[in-house]
Image: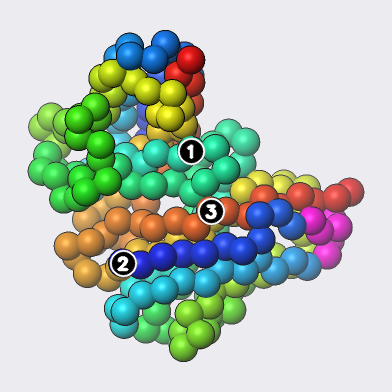
Amino acid sequence: AQTVTQSQPEMSVQEAETVTLSCTYDTSESDYYLFWYKQPPSRQMILVIRQEAYKQQNATENRFSVNFQKAAKSFSLKISDSQLGDAAMYFCAYRSADPGTYKYIFGTGTRLKVLA
Amino acid sequence: EAGVAQSPRYKIIEKRQSVAFWCNPISGHATLYWYQQILGQGPKLLIQFQNNGVVDDSQLPKDRFSAERLKGVDSTLKIQPAKLEDSAVYLCASSLVLSTEAFFGQGTRLTVV
């Protein structure tokens, strides 16, 4: 069974600085997808960035980028130029590419605080 | 485009009572998920539908939880009878069948007292 681990329950960053959130996962599959979701106090999960395992190039979305290390099964999220609106819970998630198992498996989350 | 709609947003019930949650997915999304998110934890899948068929309900406590998706659109999740440990946020999400992105609703926060 696949597992996702986020070892940082909480992180803090100064506004305009850079922060990296860690995520490791375990799987025996070779093809899968990885995601970072943001959950603000409104509770709605919002997709931040996704990575296809077969792609070597790290995904980037504006101020958000990932460091995907497939052999190490590591998937960290870097937030550059942090803004107050980035404060939220961040969840790392795994999804198999097998059409029969499309469920998302989430880590326990990292609470990000942005200090003014 | 309208998002995933859930109701109610909050519910407080006594243990042993029953409760139902409703979800309306994004139009055209064949896949629908119900997740349970206990405070301080990540969401855990309870059940996944594709159209009106169940794909995965391996973590659904079937002695007290039930879910249905009539006509492959709206879905309801029921708990009967509720226990204190059912206190959580219940999230509904939907996606296109071959899409890698799931869209989430705002969830229902259930408190069992």
At label 3, which amino acid type do we have? Thr
Residue A47 located within the stretch drawn in magenta = no
Left or right of A61 in this view: B43: left
At label 2, which amino acid type do we have? Ala
Marks 1 and 2 close (CB-CB < 8 Å): no
Whether labels 1 and 2 share one chain = no
Q: Which percent across, then down, holds residue B103?
A: 39, 46
Callout 2 crowding tier (Cα within 10 Å): few <14, some 14–19, many ≥20: few
- Residue at the disc numbered 2: A1
In the rendered structure, find residue B38 and report the number of the disc placed on it. Answer: 1
Above or below, A7 against A108 in this view is below
In the rendered structure, find residue A2 and report the number of the disc placed on it. Answer: none
At label 1, which amino acid type do we have? Ile
Chain name for mark 1: B
Please tell me which residue is depicted at 30% across the width and 56% down the height of the picture.
A103
**Label 3's element?**
loop
Q: Which percent across, then down, holds residue B83?
A: 37, 23
Question: Which of disc 3 and disc 2 is earlier in sequence?
Answer: 2
Residue A13 located within the stretch drawn in magenta = yes
Quarter of the rendering containing residue A43 = top right
- Residue at the disc numbered 3: A108
Region of the chain picked out in magenta, as a range: A12-17
Left or right of A36 in this view: A12: right
Please tell me which residue is depicted at 31% across the width and 79% down the height of the picture.
A28
Left or right of A91 in this view: B18: left
Total residue callouts: 3
Question: Which quadrant is the N terminus of chain B positioned in?
Answer: top left
Q: Is residue A63 visible?
A: no
Chain name for mark 3: A
